[in-house]
Image (spheres, coloured by chain):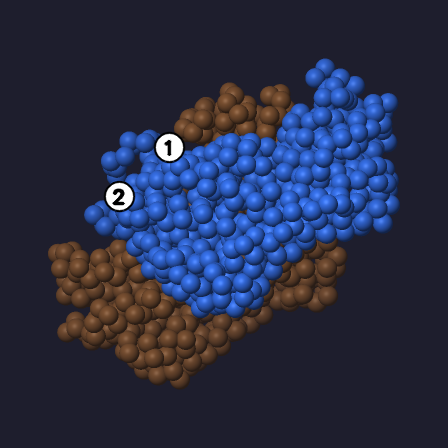
Chain colours: A brown, B blue
Amino acid sequence: MDVARILVGGEWRPANAEATFHAANPATGQDLPLAFPVSRWSDCDLALAAATRAATELRTIKPEKIAAFLEAYADNMEAAATIIVAAAEETALSVTPRLKDVELPRAANQLRLAAAAARTESWRRATIDLEKNIRSCFAPIGPVVVFGPNNFPLAFNGVSGGDFAAAIAAGNPVIAKAHPLHPNTTRLLAEQAFKAIEMAGLPPATVQLIYNVSNENGLKLVSDPRVGAVGFTGSRNAGLQLKRAAEDAGKPIYLEMSSINPVIFLPGALVERSEQLAAELVDSVLAGSGQFCTSPNLVLAFDTLQTEPFLAQVARSFKERSAQPLLSAAGRKQLHEGVTALTSAGAELITGGNYVLGEGYCYANTLLHVTASQFLAAQHELQREIFGNATLAVTLRNQQELQSILRLLQGNLAGAIYSAMSGEDDEIYNAIAPLLREKVGRLLNDKMPTGVAVSPAMVHGGPYPSASHPGFTSVGIPASIHRFAKLECYDSVRSERLPALLRDTIANPSTWRTINGGWIKG
Amino acid sequence: MDVARILVGGEWRPANAEATFHAANPATGQDLPLAFPVSRWSDCDLALAAATRAATELRTIKPEKIAAFLEAYADNMEAAATIIVAAAEETALSVTPRLKDVELPRAANQLRLAAAAARTESWRRATIDLEKNIRSCFAPIGPVVVFGPNNFPLAFNGVSGGDFAAAIAAGNPVIAKAHPLHPNTTRLLAEQAFKAIEMAGLPPATVQLIYNVSNENGLKLVSDPRVGAVGFTGSRNAGLQLKRAAEDAGKPIYLEMSSINPVIFLPGALVERSEQLAAELVDSVLAGSGQFCTSPNLVLAFDTLQTEPFLAQVARSFKERSAQPLLSAAGRKQLHEGVTALTSAGAELITGGNYVLGEGYCYANTLLHVTASQFLAAQHELQREIFGNATLAVTLRNQQELQSILRLLQGNLAGAIYSAMSGEDDEIYNAIAPLLREKVGRLLNDKMPTGVAVSPAMVHGGPYPSASHPGFTSVGIPASIHRFAKLECYDSVRSERLPALLRDTIANPSTWRTINGGWIKG
C-alpha cells in the first residue's frame, strides 16, 4: 500500500506508522485513495531533534533570508494554486470563489506580511536604555508545534496559515500537525514550503510535517522539553487537553477554541432595514456551512413588530438555500447532537434540524428560537457552540433581559451590535455595549463577525474559553508574532557583542525601536 | 485579642478569621505583638465582589485619575517612610541603607513611572487601520490578585510593588495577599494606598488587602471566575500549585519562581582582576543574605592558576563577614537542607554549612565546590536553588565541560559572563554566550545579576521555570503592564462610540500609537 511520506528532518521520508487513515470527500462520503500515516512517537522525536538543531541555526541567519523564504513560499503557493485547490475534494469547499480566489490569496498575503515583518524586525520591539546600557527585544522562542483546524485548509493550515507565518517570522522552526480531514491539501502545501526552503537556503528542518498522531503522543509532543510554544485552532475538548499538558510542562500554548459570537439587533435597526439585515445574517450563518470560528450562533433581537417577519425571512432563506456539505460525518453528527440538545432544553425548531438525505454530509440549514426568559432559565444548556449551519435566535422583552444574558455569556471571539442609523437606539447601545465589550475580543457595529480581515489592528482572540489568553491574537501581523517570541535582555553587554538590532545605530532604515522611551525609525 | 483589620470593599474591617498569626523578628526569633487574621473564604468572596464592581467603575475613569492616585500613593509612602520602615523588625533588613534609602525610593519610583505610563496611555499600543476601520488596543484585564514575595517587603510587596503598580496602571483593581512574614509592613503600606485612593477619588475597592488564607482558599482565589489575572513572586512549590489552579480556570498567571543565576568567570578575567571579581561576587552572594531572586547560586570558573586563590579569597570574605539574619526560621531550615543536599551529592564544603548560634535566624555564609565532572554526573541534585547566603562553585577543565553544563541548565532569570578586557577570552565568550543566552532572561557582561534596574529595557523574567512565560517581564514599565491587559478590537465601530484613544485624532500630545503601520506621537 502506498502511504504518504512525512516531511521530517529535511526529507520526505516514510513514517514509522502505527496505523494509516484516509480523508473522505464530504460531498460524497467516499474515502479518497491516498493513505496517510499515524506517526509513532519516534517520528515526533526525530522532528523535535531536527527542529532543535534548526532553531539554533536559525538564530544565526539574517532576517532577510527568512523573509525570502516566506515570499518564495507565497510565490510557489500561487504558482501551484491549481494543484493545491484540487485537493478541495477533501473539504468540499468550492474551488472558486472560496479556495482559489479567497483563501489561497489570503494565505499568500499572510506569508508576505510576515516576510515584511521579519525583514524590518520592528516586531521585535527593540528597547534601548542608553543611560543604563540595558537593551532588550523579542527573540525566537524555539520550535513551534502548530495544530491547524478543519475549517480553513489553506489560511489556517498548520503548514501555511497564520500561526505558521507568525512562528516562522519570529525565527522559529515549525512542526505542523496536519488536520486529518485534509492531509493531502497539507501535503501539497508542505511541498511548496519545502521547495521554498531549498530556494532560500534555510535549515531544511525549518518546516516539518506529521499527518497524525495518537492522542497520547499529541500530549507528549506539546509538553516535550524541546518545544518552545504551541499554536492550536480547533475544538474546545481537544484544546483543553493540549492546554493542560503544555502548561504543566511550562510551555506557552495559544488556543483558539470555541465561540458563539452573539449578534444583537436593536429595535431601530430592524425598523430601518430589516430585510437587508436578515439577508446579511443568513449569509453570515451559512458561510462555509456555518463552520467559521466567528459564525453567529446566537442572535439577540427585541420582540417588536419587526422581529417576527425578520425571523420569518431568515427561516425562508434557510429553507431556500441548499445545504452545503459539512466537513465530516462526525461534524454533522455533532451538529445534530447540538441542535437536539437545544430543542431538549426548550428551543423551538423553526426550520431544519435534520440530516439532508443523499451522498454528502449535508444538514438542513437550521434556525432555532427561545425567549430570553427561557434562555436565562437554561443558560448552561442553551449557551452552546453549534458548529455548522445553525443558529439560535433569542427574543427579548426588554433591555434588562439583554443585560442579564450578556452578563452570563462566556468569552467569545467576536460580537456585533446593529443599531439604527437615526440614533434612536443609541441609549440602549450605550447601556449594553460595555457588557458585550467585556465578553468579546472584537466588537463590531452594523457588520457580521464572519469576516476576519488581515490587518495589524485585527484581534482574532478573546476572553477564555474562546481563546486561551485574552492578550494575544492569532490574526494580524505583527501582533500575532509575539506569541512565538520570548524577551531577551542584554545588561551592560559589550557593544560589539550585541545583536545588530540592539546597537546604538542600525543599518536598516525601516526598523522601529524605542530608545530612551520614544519610538524611532531607523 | 486585638487582630489587624483587612482592607476589603473600601473599608478596614474585621476579618472573618479561621485563625490568627504573628510575624517574628528574624534578628531575635521572637514573635511580634500584633495578631493578623487568616481569612476564611467569605473575605475573599467579598473582596472579589467589590473588585468586580471597582473594575467596571475604573473602565469609565480617566487615566489621569489613576495616575493621580499612583503619584499620591508615592508621595504618601515617602511622607510615611519613617513609620513604614520601622516595620523592618519583621524582616531584620536594615532601615538604612536598605529599606529607607534603596527599597522605598525604588517602590515610589515604580509607582511614579506607572503613573506616567497610565497618563500617556502609550502602553495601550493603540493600533489603527484607517482604511479597514479596525482599531485595537490593550485594555484592563479585570481584578488582579497579587502575591508578593518574602524578600522585598516594599518594592515587590503585593500592595506597593511592581506587580501592583503595573496592574493599577492598566486600570485594574488589585487584591493583595500579604506575605505572612511581613504583614505589618504590608498593612502600613495599604494605609497609605487607601489614603491616596480617597485623595484621588478612585473606587474605594481599587486596592484591597487580605493577610493570609489557607492553601485551599488561595487556589480557589486564583481560579475564581471574577479574577482577571494573577501575579506571583515566590517559591516554585507554591507557585506551581497556583499556576495549575489558575490555568485550569483559564486565568493568565505570571509567576517568578526560582533561579540559580549562573555567573561565569573566563580565565583572562581572573588573570586581569581576580581580587576585584572575588569582592564583587561576595557582595552579590551576600546581598540581602542571599535572598535575592537574582542571587548567584552557581559560579563557574576554569581550573587555572588564578582559580584556587580566587575561591580562597571568596571563602575568606565569607568567614570574615558576619552572617545576616535570614527572613524566617523555615528559610534557614530550607537553606540548611539545600546545603546538605549538595554535600550529599558530592559537593565539598569550603566554608559555612551550619547554623550560627544565637537569637536570630542566622546561617554561616557558605561556599561549596564541585568539579564540572561531578556536576555533570549529579546535575539533578546539584542544579538546585539555595535561597540564602550560599553558593556553589564549579571548576571546569575545559570549554566542553562548560558547554555541557550550560546545555543542561534550566531556565534562569539572569546569567553573567566575566571576560578579559584584553579580548583574550573572546573566542570562548563567542562559543558559550549563545548557550547561556538560551537559558536566561537577562544576559550580563562583567556585572553581577543582583541589581535589577527599573528601566523600560529591563527583563525580570526568563525561560521556565524561572518564570511562567518567557515573553513577559515583572520589572520595567511599560512592558510589565501588558501582563495585566487584554486586547480589545473595534471593527467598524461608529466613530463617536470609540474610546478616545482610538479616534482618528486624540487630545494627548504624548500618546504613541501606530496608525497604518507607523508609530506616531500625539
Residue drawn at point x = 18 percent, y = 66 percent: A267
Along the viewing direction, whichever of B217 and B225 lies nearer the viewer: B217
Classify B122 as above or below A221: above
B512 sits left or right of A137 in the view: left
Residue drawn at point x = 72 percent, y = 35 percent: B322
Q: Residues within 10 Å of mark 1 (few under 14, many from 20)?
A: some
Pinpoint the chain carrying mark 1: B
Where is residue B251 shown, x and y percent of the image? 49, 58
User: Are circles 2 and 1 on residues that touch, CB within 8 Å?
Assistant: no
Q: Which residue is mark 1?
A: B519
Along the viewing direction, whichever of B441 and A125 lies nearer the viewer: B441
Q: Residues within 10 Å of mark 2 (few under 14, many from 20)?
A: few
Q: Are marks 2 and 1 on the same chain?
A: yes
Q: Secondary structure at mark 2?
A: helix
Residue drawn at point x = 42 percent, y = 52 percent: B174
Classify B300 as above or below A82: above
Residue drawn at point x = 36 percent, y = 69 percent: A408
Nearer the N terminus, badge 2 or badge 1? 2
Q: Secondary structure at mark 1?
A: strand
A193 sits left or right of B277 in the view: left
Along the viewing direction, whichever of A363 and B221 lies nearer the viewer: B221
For badge 1, the amino acid type reads Trp
Q: Quadrant of the C terminus of chain B?
A: top left
For badge 2, the amino acid type reads Ala
* Picture quadrant of residue A466: bottom left
Distance (Cα) linking label 2 and label 1 = 18 Å
Q: For the view shown, which residue lies furthest in the top direction? A: B422
On residue B500, the disc is 2
Where is residue A301 shown, x and y percent of the image? 24, 69
Where is residue A385 shown, x and y percent of the image? 42, 70
Where is residue A474 shown, x and y percent of the image? 47, 51
Classify A104 as above or below A380: above
